[in-house]
Image (tube, rainbow, N blue to C red):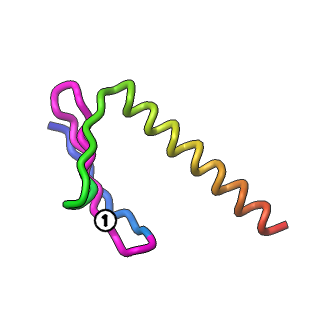
Amino acid sequence: MFVLNKAIKHDGGTHNVEVKVDNDQLVIYFGNSFTLRVDEKNADKLRELLYDGTRELTIARQNRSL
């Protein structure tokens, strides 16, 4: 089983985020708070959504520095 771990900082502290491949699903654990199970197609949708969000953050940061 493939496993990745990262400590992700947020406004309330830090969460350990763990990603596992379990058969045909990606299982994402957000500490003990939340678990998300998605297939490959929906994992790509989540990745795209996060990427689009980071692009918007970058644009907002650049606009603030003008």
Give the percent coordinates (x, y) of residue 29.
24, 51
**In what element is the residue under mark 1?**
strand
The quadrant in which residue 40 appears is top left
Residue at point 21% right, 35% down? 21
> In the rendered view, does 43 fall on the left or right side of 24?
right
Magenta stretch holds residue 12? yes
Q: Is residue 6 above or below residue 46?
A: below
> In the rendered view, does 65 fall on the left or right side of 57?
right
Residue at point 75% right, 61% down? 62
The image shows a total of numbered marks equal to 1
> In the rendered view, does 51 fall on the left or right side of 47?
right
Q: Using the image as rendered, state which of residue 60 and residue 34 is in the foreground.
A: 34
Q: Quadrant of the C terminus?
A: bottom right
Give the percent coordinates (x, y) of residue 57.
64, 56
Residue at point 64% right, 48% down? 55
User: Circle 1: is it few (<14), some (14-19), or many (20+) Cα within 10 Å?
Assistant: some
The quadrant in which residue 25 appears is top left
Residue at point 28% right, 56% down? 30
Give the percent coordinates (x, y) of residue 17.
29, 56
Which residue sits furthest front? 33
Q: Which residues make up the magenta segment?
A: 11-29
Q: Is residue 47 above or below residue 8?
A: above
Which residue sits furthest right? 66
Magenta stretch holds residue 17? yes
Tell me the chief SS of the magenta region: strand
Q: Is residue 56 above or below residue 43?
A: below
> In the rendered view, does 27 fall on the left or right side of 66?
left
Q: Quadrant of the N terminus?
A: top left
- Mark 1, residue position: 15
Q: Callout 1, which amino acid?
A: His
